[in-house]
Every structure is written in C-alpha cells, then in structure tokens.
Amino acid sequence: MSKIADITPFEILDSRGNPTIEVEMTSSSGISARASVPSGASKGSHEALEIRDGDEMRFGGLGVLKAIQLIETIIKPKLIGFELGNQKGLDDLLISLDGTRNKGVLGANSILGISLSYARLSAQEGGIPLYVHIASEFRFDPKSSNVTPMFNVINGGLHGSGTIDMQEFLIIPHYTLPFMQKLQMGVELYHSIKKKLHENRKMTSVGDEGGFTPQFYTNNEVLKFLSSSIAPYQNSFHIGLDCAATTYFKQGRYKLIDFKDSSDASLYIQYLEKIIKEFHIVSLEDGLAEDAWTDWAKLTQRVGNSCMIVGDDLLVTNKERLEKAIQSRSCTAILVKVNQVGTLTETYEVIRIAKQAGFRVIISHRSGETTDDFIADLAVGTGADFVKFGAPARGERVAKYNRLFHIYTKLQK
Ligand code: PGA
Ligand code: ZN
C-alpha cells in the first residue's frame, strides 16, 4: 500500500466569501486528492471547535492561517509515511494529537481537511469511487441506496435576510420514489415556487442555502404559501422545517415573529403540534433549544409517530449526545455534519449507532460550503435515508446534487 508523501493546506473561500481550509494530500505513488471544509452560521454550542485567526486586519478575523500552521507544524510531520487505507488509524492519531474532547487544540477544521482528503486519496489508490470505498466500511451495497433529498426552498433565520425566524422551509419528495425522479420533481417544484413568488410580487433573491428569501412577515405565512405550492402534487411532496430554535430561544422562552409575546416551552410545544398537524409537516429539525432535553422527549412522545423529530444542534454528530437521545427518546433522527465532529471515523461511528437504534440518518451540508462533493458519496456509501444539501441552486449546493446524479447514473448501469 502507498503512503502519505506530502500534505499541502490552502486557505480558500467558502460560499459566503469567508476563508476555509482545503487540504491536498499526495501519495508515494504520485496520486493527489483534495478535500475542503464547510462552516456553519447557526452552530450548535456543543460542536467541535473551528480554529480561526481572530486577526481583525484579515478577513474580519476569520482567516485560517493559524489552522494551516498547525497542519504544517504538528500534523504533517507525524503523517508523512503513514500508510493509506487505514482511516481509523489515521483518525485515532489525529484525535490523540489534539488530545481534547472538542478538537480545541488543532481545530476540527484542520483535522477534518486531513481526514477527508485521506479517505479520498485512499479510494483513488484503490482504484474505486469514494462511495464504494465508504460502502465497504459499512458492508453496504450502494446499489440499494435511494436517498431522499430535502430541498430547502425558503431561507429564514440566520440564512435569510427578512423577518422570518425559522431557518429552513423544506420540501421533501416521497421517499419511495426513485432518486432521479425525486431530484427532478424537487427541481421542477423549486422553479414553480419561483414563478408563484413572482406572481405574488415577492422577491426571488436567494439566501445562504439557495432557497428564496421573499418578504413574508410570519412563519405561518410561509407555511401557508408552501402548502399551496405543493397542493397540486398531493401525495408526492411534504413539508419539513428546520426551526434552529436555539436562535430564537431567549431567557428560557421562545420568541417567534408570529406572536406578540414570547412563549414558555409548553405553550410553544402546543404551537409546534398545531402546525405539524395543520401543514402535514413530516420532519421537524431543532424545533426546540439545543439543551432542552426534557422538552425534546415530550415533543417526540406527542408527535414522533407522524413526524420525524431531527436533532442537529441537539446532537451535533456527537456519540455521547446521540446515546443520551436514544436512551431518553428525545428524537427519532440525526442530522450528520462531518465538521461538527471533525473526523470521518467518528462520523461513521455516529451513523452506525443511529442506524442500530432505528434512527433515520440525514447527511447534511453547512450553510457555508465549498464545491466539494464528498458528502454525496458519504450519503450513498453509508446508506443514509436523506440528504440535506439546500436548494437546487448556487454552485456549491448543485455540486453535491450533480455528484448524486453521477453516482446513481453509474449505479443504474
Ligand atoms: P448551519 O445551518 O450550517 O448554518 O449551522 C444548517 C442547519 O442548521 O442545518
Ligand atoms: Zn439545522
């Protein structure tokens, strides 16, 4: 087996124009692979740490030269000569080099760039596509993969520019349809939503994840609009929500634009129940604040049978938090983001535990993305149920959908 011969980290830009890390790794046989690292806006406070320069004179403090320096001086010297094809060995070494629970010394951004480029290079060395390489870890046959895309068509909260405080309004095609049909239908619906917004004299500019940011004044108005947009498609589409509720959870209460006053948890849960019923919402992500464990369990007990309850900021792709959620029945699905944890091996472990517990698995992008399409292969290779890659617009989102097009076309041959 070939070995790591060289590692070159770069400072590149993400889709928001903020610096991020890209790593190029070269093998002793002369093959190179690159991977880059995404970044969130509505981060969970329990995520692994991203190292930024904090130097206000460069990129408003968001530069990643410090993280690059850490790769050059600490990580690279330990990895030159390390054999390819041993993801767990590599990730364990990275974890022990860092030595903290939250990757606070070397940074989840530095570590992830190494972990992902190593996986890609190992696949290339083996002469197999990345999703096949990943599937072999899971003993999964990629031919049985049929992910369902959750399209984020209206962007609010920290990803939009208006008054809407819920972050993502999603349309979800019915999971039993074949992937190609789900993707095509989602794209067509995205265009028909744009047309409908025009007809209603609303803006069709897009937010961070490619969804529209029209001038709606309440979350309820958006739900009504979406509900009428999918009406002609009856049973083929359903509505999903990522509330990112921690962003509007203030002093123990939930403050939504829809109501004059803020609500306590029990009143707010009643409201969630009402909209889930009224709009046939099939997936609710981060409906509650990131540490409100008891309320999550309450909500899951009340609506978990008809609506998938998804933990993003609650679980942060973290094994211990996932185990706590399984044991306390706080949700029924996990959003998986590679940069919340920082290594591929830990991501695999979380996916395995989630599947064993019967949780649904959603592979997700971040609002700050690059054109790297790694997570498309990750979704197919791990046999994930859903992907959340934003709207079918903006190059960094479309890159992932196009990779899925490639993969499923090949798999159909
Ligand atoms: P983020 O948002 O990448 O800005 O954290 C995505 C999400 O909350 O799912
Ligand atoms: Zn989320």
Image (cartoon, grey):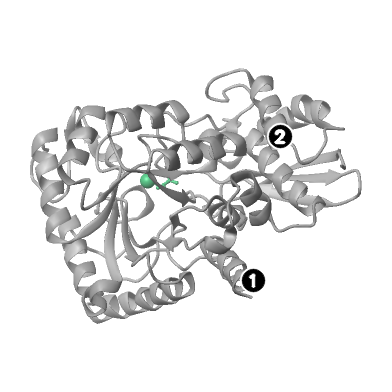
Q: Amino acid at mark 2?
A: Ile
In the image, residue 126 sits, relative to residue 299, either above or below, namely: below
Cα separation between marks 1 and 2: 36 Å
Tag 1, which secondary structure? helix
Judge left or right: residue 211 versus residue 289: right
**Whole-percent x, y for residue 21 in the image:** 65, 42
In the image, 70 versus 412, the foreground residue is 412
Q: Which residue is mark 2?
A: 68
Residue 410: mark: 1
| Front position among marks 1 and 2 | 1
Which numbered dot is residue 3?
Answer: none
Question: Is residue 46 visible to us here?
Answer: yes
Q: Nearer the viewer, residue 228 or 298?
A: 298
The quadrant the C terminus occupies is bottom right
Identified by mark 1, the residue type is Lys
Report whether 312 appears left or right of 378.
left
Q: Residue drawn at (27%, 75%), measured in percent from left and top?
A: 197
Q: Is mark 2 within 8 Å of ligand 1?
A: no
